[in-house]
Amino acid sequence: MQQRLGTTDRADRFYDDQVLDHLNDRMREFVGRQEMFFLATADRHGECDSTFRAGPPGFLQVLDERTLAYPEYRGNGVMASIGNLSENPHLGILMIDFTRDRIGLHVNGRARVVMDDEMRERHPYLPVDPIPGRRAQLWVEVTVEETYIHCAKHIPHLQKVPRQAAGSRAWGTDDAKRKGGDFFGAAAEADSRRKAAADRPAGTAAGPAATPVTPTAPVPAAPPATPEVRQVRKEVEREVERVLARAERSAPASEGGGFRGWFG
């Protein structure tokens, strides 16, 4: 796709300048103050799942420059992410700071699941959370393979609501209403299907057969870029250069080196 869309040179510059195989000092500081991240996993067949993890600052632990760990709290019992990792250890973590730096960090790596007692035996300094719903049942230990920036230009700038206005979060609750109830109506649909099935005479088909899926045609090669497309690319590149120039002015280079992105 880089070759088709003519982005190989830009991609190579990104690999050379921004992609690391470890967490540098600025990345470790960034990770240590995050309160949430997005997690991507897949099973052995490549079927994907994405989810959200949250906790107090520091819940995503930096064990060293090549190792992260995060706790798994009591959830809905499905164990989708843990189940995927038991079949396929590859994962992707995306942390986004919406409120302060308005920047993101990707971490890709390999994971293994560790029980809480084993994790604390190896790392006795891990904090014990005072909130029962935030006490780890087990941990996911991540060996870092790739780290790189998620650029700021499309990240919205949000503000945190004061704690007293936000209300207390119901960590560990089984109260369906406090967990969100049937916000999307899925339970109502399931109940309706069960009632319809109970009312159907025995031997009656549940409904029409599924419509066959038409195979997707191969993606054709992209035509040569028109003058208009080339002009848009130039404008985008100029805008990126302006963003980087502003970042360089607001984040002076450290001693001995020029600006290399927010994470050094």
Image (cartoon, rainbow, N blue to C red):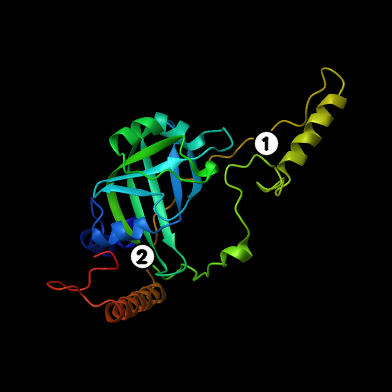
Image side of residue 4 versus residue 264, left or right: right
Question: Does the rendering let one see residue 176?
Answer: yes
Q: Secondary structure at mark 1?
A: loop
Looking at the picture, does residue 135 appear above or below residue 148? above
The picture quadrant where one finds residue 203 is top right
Which one is nearer the viewer's eye here, 51 or 58?
A: 58
Q: Amino acid at mark 1?
A: Thr
The picture quadrant where one finds residue 249 is bottom left
The picture quadrant where one finds residue 195 is top right
Distance Cα–Cα, label 1 vs label 2: 37 Å
The residue that mark 2 highlights is 224
Residue 211's disc is: 1
Give the residue drawn at x 19%, y 73%. 254
Disc 1 residue crowd, few under 14, some 14–19, many 20+, Cα 10 Å: few
Task: Residue lying at the far left in this picture: please name it.
Answer: 256
Which of the two discs, 1 and 2, labels the residue nearer the N terminus? 1
Give the residue drawn at x 77%, y 41%. 188
Give the x, y percent position of residue 129. Answer: 46, 45
Image side of residue 150 versus residue 52, left or right: left
Give the x, y percent position of residue 91. Answer: 38, 42
Quarter of the picture holding the N terminus: bottom left
Looking at the picture, does residue 259 appear above or below residue 126? below
Which one is nearer the viewer's eye here, 226 or 171?
A: 171
Of tags 1 and 2, which is closer to the observer? 1
Question: Does the rendering let one see residue 88?
Answer: no
Task: Residue lying at the far top in this picture: please name it.
Answer: 203
Give the x, y percent position of residue 92. Answer: 38, 46
Looking at the picture, does residue 164 appear above or below residue 122? below
Q: Are marks 1 and 2 in contact (CB under 8 Å)?
A: no
Give the residue drawn at x 24%, y 59%. 25
Quarter of the picture holding the C terminus: bottom left
